[in-house]
Image (spheres, rainbow, N blue to C red):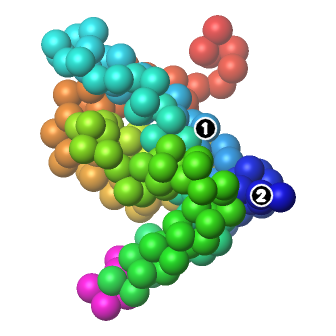
Amino acid sequence: MHHFFAMLSRMKNVNRWGLMRNTRRENLCEHSFETAVIAHALAVLRNTRFGGHADAERAAVLALFHDATEIVTGDLPTPVKYYSPQIRSAYRGVEDAARSRLLGLLPEDLRGVYRPLLGEPREADRELLPLVKAADKISGLIKCVEEKRMGNREFASAEDSLRKAVEEMRLPEADCFLEEFLPSYSLTLDEQG
């Protein structure tokens, strides 16, 4: 018996933004789905508008699994994770242990397929990682925009930080997403219609 997929199913039990007052909780499963959709969109934008040849489907799959180790570690808030080089280094060790634990829940013959998805990317995936990272930050930015729309100012500083982080990545496809798609997240359903 192998427990990998049952463990992945627990992503829905890991809440994000633990230090923040939320008008609506967001779990890791929701975040991973949204990050995958955005990573796919960024790859499509790269290919369609900027002459790239990114594998959009692979970007989406990498994004689906990008935080899978948090099933074991929980969602460590960003201010804690990056507080000092020592904490960041220790957390990398915790992530490595979590990755090993998850891979150990798979049959041996499947581990090679899932290892790159859990944070040990293949060389061919390296060009996609900035898109996944941008998608991750954009997903967080969307959460901030939605919270602000609900009158929650708790996320104002995080919104500014995440927007700046995405802009500093200097990815034209991410800039395009911010300009063309992000504003819709602050509208009501009727306004989007």
Q: Please state the extent of the stretch shown in magenta in the rendering.
A: 82-88
- At label 1, counting other C-alpha atoms closer than 10 Å, the crowd grade (few under 14, some 14-19, many 20 or more) is some
Residue 40 appears anywhere in the view = no
Q: Amino acid at mark 1?
A: Phe
Residue 121 in percent (x, y) is at: 35, 50
Image position of 58 (left or right of 184)? left
Q: Amino acid at mark 2?
A: His
- Residue at x 67% of width, y 44% of height: 30
Q: CA distance from mark 1 to mark 2?
A: 24 Å
Q: Which residue has dot 1 on it?
A: 33
- Number of on-image labels: 2
In the picture as drawn, the residue positioned furthest to the front comes out as: 109
- Residue at x 23% of width, y 11% of height: 49
Residue 177 in percent (x, y) is at: 35, 26
- Residue at x 43% of width, y 30% of height: 58
Q: Which residue has dot 2 on it?
A: 2
Residues 10 and 114: in front is 114
